[in-house]
Amino acid sequence: MRDLDVIDLYERIDEGYTEKFLENTESKVHTKVEIEKIVEDTEWLDLMEEVIPYIDAIFRNPNKFIINEEEIMKIEQTKKVTVESIKHLSKNTNFIQEVDKRTGDVTPSKLLNVRKEESYNTYENRVIYTLVQNMKFYVSKKREYAEARKNAQEKNIRQIDYEGKSRINGEVVNIEFHVDSKLEDKSKSKTDTDIVLERIDRINQKIKDISFTELYKILEKINFAPVTSPVKKTNMILKNVRFQYAMKLWEYMQTHMDDESKKFSNRDEKDNDEETKSMVDETFLLDYLISRTLVEEDLKTKEKVQNRITTTLIQRIISINPNMPVEDFKKMVGDKYEVIKNRNLVNTSEIQTIFKKYIDEFLEKLK
């Protein structure tokens, strides 16, 4: 049965009839709710997913500095004379071997040799490398917690038992039904814990990608001691946006290592709750109205409804196409008549659909 038919059920009777049915209704209802659910902690996942792109950017655009290695070498071994070499010689005249008095040329015996090298072994790089190691351990622990919860039994049970009786115009109406709603088998549906595990796997993959960067491999070979808290607030750590996000994650992991998921439980059992009873009484009325459609006794009412529906449909068609000729309208109606005539508009499955819809709406309110 279509929604239009359900609305029509109420429109076909006057308000007094409805009120009389409900006033004469004697009913009792019993409800039971039993819910046990794991509420996953996803705050750390949200933060880590936000920060990882900044950490990745640091590793792909590394901070470095120049190392000057100084060594005093014999003049014949010196390959390059720099400004630093001349300044050093002027301060260390004992390295001067000979001075040509005529030309003023100086012949040194030894010179300072300065060799410049780039180094990635900066404090900031050691901090960010240590952060990645901490992330690996942190994510590993969180995955252990999630795996332990994966097979935890969850419950979601909602039940309604209802018995009702009413009298209307000499007619006695009885109803009795039971509604039982349970959580699906976990093997058939994805749980919140499954989603958390999938997000953890994606984070692990991103950390693995970082470990393939050149900077990570260089720092891995240096074998330095991990940086410990508190982290020194260097200019770069304080002012660089990427490091600001990295330190936000560093500080969060220091204080949120434990499993912070929670188990939510709700158990409730009631008899004749007024609000619930009122709503289910109305579904009793709806079921009764549906039963009346099985045998239509009020032919005048039926004819009146048919005329009203026909008028409404014609008005809608005319509003869509005001210039439609009468012949075209008759042809359109005639083409559909035989098909529609043979349809069983009121059948058991459709009644069940309506009933289920209203019960579902009631259960949603109850929840």
Image: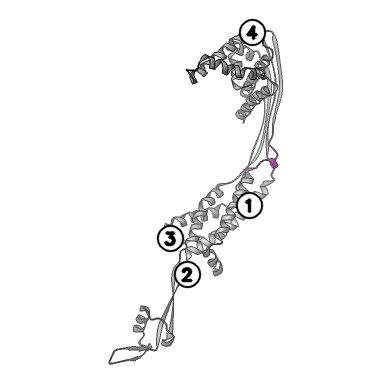
Q: Residues within 10 Å of mark 3 (few under 14, many from 20)?
A: few
Q: What residue sits 57% from the left and 17% below the top?
A: 331
Q: Closer to the camera, 133 or 198? A: 198
Q: Amino acid at mark 2?
A: Ser
Above or below, 195 relative to 156: below
Using the numbered discs, state the Cα–Cα distance from disc 4 to disc 2 in whole angstroms: 97 Å
* Residue 330 location, quadrant: top right
Asked whether residue 189 is drawn in magenta, I would say yes
Counting residues from the start of the chain, the first of labels 2 and 3 encountered is 2
Quickly name the residue at label 3: 236
Q: Closer to the camera, 25 or 358? A: 358
- Check the picture and name the quadrant holding the N terminus: top right
Using the numbered discs, state the Cα–Cα distance from disc 4 to disc 1 in whole angstroms: 69 Å
Q: Which mark is residue 119?
A: 2
- Check the picture and name the quadrant holding the C terminus: top right
Q: What kind of colouring is applied to the model shown?
A: one colour
Q: Which mark is residue 143?
A: 1
Give the foreground label among 3 and 4: 4
Q: Which mark is residue 299?
A: 4
Q: Which mark is residue 125?
A: none
Residue 142 seen in this snapshot: yes
Secondary structure state at the residue bearing disc 1? helix
Give the foreground label among 4 and 1: 4
Secondary structure state at the residue bearing disc 4? helix
Q: Amino acid at mark 1?
A: Arg
Asked if the residue at tag 1 contacts the one at tag 3, i.e. Cβ–Cβ closer than 8 Å, the answer is no
Asked if the residue at tag 1 contacts the one at tag 4, i.e. Cβ–Cβ closer than 8 Å, the answer is no
Counting residues from the start of the chain, the first of labels 2 and 1 encountered is 2
Above or below, 108 relative to 313: below
